Image (spheres, helix red, strand yellow):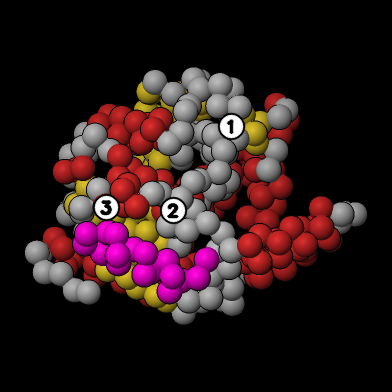
Amino acid sequence: MADKLADFRKPEDAEAYYRLYDRILEEHWPTIAHEEIDIPGRFGTTRVRRTGYAEGTPIVMLHPTQGGSIGLTPFIGPLAQHHCVYTPDVIGTPGRSVQTAPMQPPQDWVTWLDETLDALGLDRVHLAGYSEGGYMALLNASMTARPERLATVTLLEPGGALATMRTSSFVGMLIKMIPLMTARNAAKRKERMREFSRWFNGDGYESTDDVLDLVPLAMTFRQTTGLPKKLSDDQLRRITMPTHLMLGDSSRLFDAHKVAGRARRLLPEVTVDIRPGGHGFGYARPEEEMARVLAFIADHERGRVTR
């Protein structure tokens, strides 16, 4: 499928998705100065949202799967008080970026981000990502043609990057998807989606009605690049920039302590931060968790490292 283009199945699916996507951004994005930039590239046009004009090295943050930059909304306010924050909609996923040429992962994902940052004129950034965005951030750190650009890398629950999903969680996910897929009306489907989200993301995570409405629309988008694949030992050893790994202690994705052990063994300069909660721990406490992200960044900008 990598020779095909990612897109919505029907024009009406795209119209419904974008209508809700734009409304959510308008109503919920922090009221901090921001602009949207369209970056043309070899794989299509990438929509980037720039928020804030604070001094300091910019932060580039990559979103979880499906929801585009909307998935980062709770984190932008705290981060943009101290840094300019760039949030690209990853090309090939549902969002405001438009793919026009096939992509062959993983190298083309790295090339896409490198070219996007080049076009934005960003020579030095703090790269961060949540869930699948964390996977893409770690992949870029390993394979980028410009490793000197990355001042730090911050990974929040990086899905698929350091470990494959637990078999028990994968089976549990399939079982819990059955009542969701068999819901007879929109209200029941939303209720079951909320239950699934609580199970997967952990206590304290609560999806808004708008996001629950967006998810089924995002599922009409045909992604063509497959699932993230765990990085090899050699790939991880190539990541020499300071790395901040944040994991939920009760994550459904993986055993946080095993993942932490692999990271400490293979990443040359890593700080591991195991936090209370599940996969959605950051969403449960966005101000608190972003304060930890900012503290890590500040320590390295001052040349002081805390482990």
Q: Earlier in the sequence, mark 1 or mark 2?
A: 2
In the image, is 256 to the left or to the right of 262?
right
Dot label at residue 161: 2
Check disc 2 and give the amino acid type.
Answer: Ala
Is residue 100 depicted above or below 183 in this figure? above
Q: Is residue 13 magenta?
A: no
What stretch of residues is rendered in magenta? Answer: 254-270
In the image, is 251 to the left or to the right of 207?
left
Q: Farthest residue in the bottom direction?
A: 276
Main structural element of the magenta stretch: helix, strand or loop?
helix
How many numbered tags mark residues here? Answer: 3
Q: Which residue lies under the disc numbered 3? A: 237
Whole-angstrom CA distance, mark 1 to mark 2, is 19 Å
Depth check, mark 3 against mark 2: the one in front is 3
Residue 244 appears in the picture as rendered: no
Rendered residue at 24%/34% (across/down)? 145
